[in-house]
Image (spheres, rainbow, N blue to C red):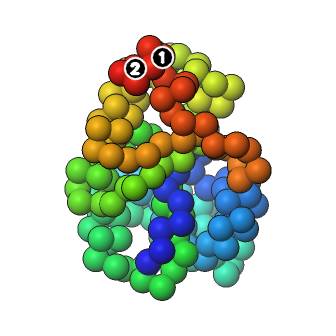
Amino acid sequence: MALVLARIDDRLIHGQVVVGWVKHLEANCIVVANDAIAADPMQRALLPMAVPPEIQVEIYKVAEAARKLAGGVEAGKRTILLFSSPMDALRFLKQGGALESLNLGGLRFAPGKTQVLKSISLGREDLEALRQLREAGTGMSVQMVPSDPAVDVLKILPGGEHG
């Protein structure tokens, strides 16, 4: 498997991913790593409908995604890996998944979160997960669509590197 993009975006599969990233990266597989979505038959049925039929969509629990991708289950595919939160990305890494770099997409505002960019709001748990991912050597940038410049996550975190 060629992991062409690992992205954190609480919307998971949506227009920016399908029209922007899939096309730009010539991806032919999307893996969603999310426990709640994997356990919800309705979401498992709906998410694949958001992509063209030639794009394979796999939905796994986070630990299952780490095992399957490490085991080469999507070998020969150009894969985009999607997480809905920094905590899921960190759990993926701790379960043996490889994450050299992460792209942060949309993380919506909610109570307890601080808006750090127009499309990125982070809470305490998010900041701690991002810190641990950085300490593990995962490179991270914010880039909504391929035509946007990539911005190092450290430049947007409150208080700099330590959050």
* Circle 1 residue: 158
Secondary element at tag 1: loop
Q: Residue at x 71, y 53 (%)?
A: 146
- Residue assigned mark 2: 163
Which residue shows up at 67% across the image and 81% down it? Answer: 54
Sequence-wise first label, 1 or 2: 1
Q: In the image, is 102 to the left or to the right of 97?
A: right
Residue 69 drawn above or below residue 72: above
Which residue type carries mark 2? Gly
Point out which mark residue 23 bears.
none
User: What is the secondary structure assignment of the residue under circle 2?
Assistant: loop
Say whether marks 1 and 2 touch (CB < 8 Å).
yes
Which quadrant is the C terminus positioned in? top left
User: Which corner quadrant holds the N terminus?
Assistant: bottom left
Q: Does residue 46 appear to the left or right of 149 in the view shown?
A: left
Task: Using a 10 Å C-alpha cutoff, classify the residue at mark 1 as few (fewer than 14 neighbours), some (14 to 19) or many (20 or more).
Answer: some
Observer-nearest residue: 70 or 9?
Answer: 70
Question: 160 or 29, which lies in front?
Answer: 160
Q: Nearer the viewer, residue 7 or 111?
A: 7
Asked whether residue 63 is in view, the answer is: yes
Coordinates of residue 74 in the picture (x, y in percent):
43, 79
Query: Whole-percent x and y of residue 52?
Result: 71, 73
Point 54% across, 47% down: residue: 103
The residue type indicated by label 1 comes to: Pro
Q: Is residue 18 visible?
A: no
Q: How many marks?
A: 2
* Rendered location of residue 151, percent (x, y): 61, 37
Identify the residue at image location x=61%, y=55%.
Answer: 13
Counting from the top left corner in percent of width and height, residue 59 is at: 45, 65
Task: Measure how far apart labels 1 and 2 are at the Cα level.
Answer: 5 Å
Dot 2: few (<14), some (14–19), or many (≥20) neighbours within 10 Å?
A: some
Q: Residue furthest left?
A: 95
